[in-house]
Image (tube, rainbow, N blue to C red):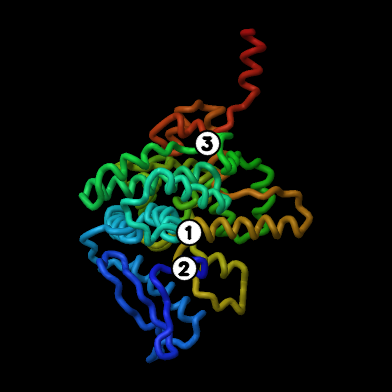
Amino acid sequence: MSNLKLNGSIYCRKGRWWWKVKLPGQSKFTYHPLRPKGAKFATKDRTIAEQVAQELWVNMLSRSDRKITSVTDIASLICAYSDFAKVYYRKADGTVSGEVDKIRYACAPLNKHYGELPVEEFGPLKLQELRQHIIGLNLCRKVVNERIRIIKRMFRWAVSNELIPVFLYQAITAVEDLKRGRSGARESKKVLPVAKEHVMVILPYTTQVVADMIRLQDLTGMRSSEVCNMRPCDVDTAEDVWVYRPYKHKTENYGYSKEIYIGPKGQEILLPYLARKRDTYCFTPAESEAQRKRKNCHQALRDKFDKDSYRRAVKYAIAAARKAGEGVKEWTPHQLRHKRATEVRNQFGLEAAKVLLGHQSLSVTESYTVPEKRLAIEAATQLG
């Protein structure tokens, strides 16, 4: 927060600091005493005053009860679009999707550098300047392009709601995506499958819960979030091959259903976890910590893992294995998905891998897999 550019001006009045600012959605400046939390009067410390002003500004941007009827500057445009996004990007269970976070990340540098700029003055050159600021954050080219597209989408939304003139959106669409090898942004590394030996070697160095999560994800190719969200009530055990239907998943807002198939090996791993209450999570941090036998663990634990805590658990297991002298490379749970997809593709074909991953497009599945050169060599031997 300390790097946030402050709008308006901070001034001293009778030894105490005040803030003159035009808040998002307001047509004129207002005056605010910069009082720290719990204080009756404005602070006498300039540094504290700036921190209080930053907190007030961030709170204004995140308020859900704010009503903005007009867009005058970039900050008010961001506020209006953020309010819309919190309602529009809502999942079936009522939670806000990750798209809202993506919008927040994309708009943060826009607000920092151009928050006070009248919206009519923001054009293609300003957008390209902003892109250079984002590149300076050492983000990869794909992420930079994604964040610029989000900003363009925000302008398009504002045009559709008659908040800004249409020419503003038309102008910034002239800014094309960064091309590979023709920009200052770094290229992202392709996610490769993790080798089986690097998976198996870390299992003794983590808890049984985390080890079972790793083994189950390895067998099914499901996403990290899907193994974390698994509940007994979501698993249909009626047939020989069980079907796991996640109650929430990445493409649910597009009307797609998701089915994950679990064979005999996966069933053997999962069976003990289906004996608990049907609406509770199969894999819990509390059970994992109990297996560590930590007597002095007073940390409040969540009722389930998320993809971040699961990834950290894998990272800790890799570190423990290395400390014990094992030669294991760094890898993440997402690479298990790539590993399984590649194995299925090479044995059963690309279509089977597409169904396994739950993709709607073969081109997406192809980006997840690494075809074996052995197949091409065999074909050249027999046909060439």
Task: For the C terminus, give its image quadrant.
Answer: top right
Q: State the mark number for residue 4.
A: none
Residue 54 location (% of width, % of height): 43, 72
x and y, in percent, of residue 336 in the image:
56, 44
Q: Which residue is mark 2?
A: 302
Q: Position of residue 335 (x, y in %)?
A: 57, 44
Residue type of the residue flagged with mark 1: Asp
The residue that mark 3 highlights is 368
Placement of 317 over or under 28, stated as above or below: above
Q: Residue at x 47, y 56 (%)?
A: 228
Which residue type carries mark 2?
Arg
Instruction: Establish if 63 lies above or below 72.
Output: below
What percent of the width, then of the height, locates residue 277? 38, 63
Instruction: Inspect this view and state whether residue 266 appears.
Output: yes
Residue at 59 percent across and 67 percent down: it is 291
Q: Which residue is mark 1?
A: 306
Q: CA distance from mark 2 to mark 1?
A: 9 Å
